[in-house]
Amino acid sequence: MKTLIIVPAYNEEKSIYNVVTSIKFNIPWADVVVINDGSKDNTYLEAKKAGAKVINLIENLGIGGAVQSGYIYALKKEYDIAVQVDGDGQHNPADLNLLLREIEKGNTDMVIGSRFVEETGYKASVFRNIGIKYFSNLVSKLCGKSYYDTTSGYRLVNKKGIELFSSYYPKDYPEVETIVYACKKGLNVKEVKVNMNEREAGKSSITPIKAIYYMAKVTMSTLNVAFRSIY
């Protein structure tokens, strides 16, 4: 199946080369597109040097806008599968085949690379662990099915998912909301165990104060998309 790897990247010059080359090593038949989200560093040059196609956004749209740009590209180029891999090196491309095998079975529309569906070596901080469990419970209740790693951005969709996310994708902190959105739109969403790395470079943009704002905003957005889908 025609496969596209979407790599959203903002100021990831120190990690993007390794991310792209690792993807190409593990699934050499797939195409890689880096969505350069208004980076101020050498992300573009490093991604090109690694052999990726690069789409330059003229301003920083945030993770949601960058990822949706990738889905729109996948739709226009008629890809069968689109995979989101973060540009900071946390997602291990060695696990890509696990996600692909699940989708190739034909009964799943969206696969999430999960740190928690089975035990892995990943250890979260106390505060982060509270957030993870909170959103897991929220999404599970809204979808009527248990989900464990709702904040994972390591995910794969088929054509049905590409079409859905091309038309709508949350701007900020989209991971939680898109699971509920996909479920309410009839997609079969499944988790598959993966191992995640530490960031190769940079640092997370989520501070404790931002985390509180994040939890409140994502909760409201997720409830909104759930009820909007019903009515």
Image: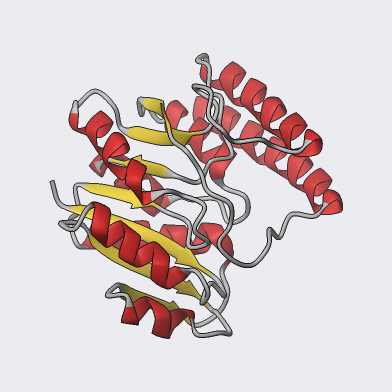
Question: In the figure, residue 183 lies in which quadrant?
Answer: top left
Task: Tell which residue pokes out farthest to the right in this image.
Answer: 209
Q: Where residue 166 sits in the image (x, y, percent)?
A: 37, 53
Q: Is residue 93 visible?
A: yes
Q: Is residue 74 visible?
A: no
**82 lies left or right of 91:** left
Viewer-side residue, 223 vs 48: 48
Q: Is residue 47 above or below residue 98?
A: below
Question: In the figure, residue 190 lies in which quadrant?
Answer: top left
Q: Where residue 9 sits in the image (x, y, percent)?
A: 49, 68
Q: Is residue 102 above or below residue 142?
A: below
Q: Where residue 67 sits in the image (x, y, percent)?
A: 45, 58
Question: In the figure, residue 75 lies in which quadrant?
Answer: bottom left
* Residue ID at (32%, 41%): 157
Q: Where residue 32 sits in the image (x, y, percent)?
A: 28, 64
* Residue ID at (62%, 25%): 136
* Residue ID at (55%, 43%): 175
Viewer-side residue, 23 vs 104: 23
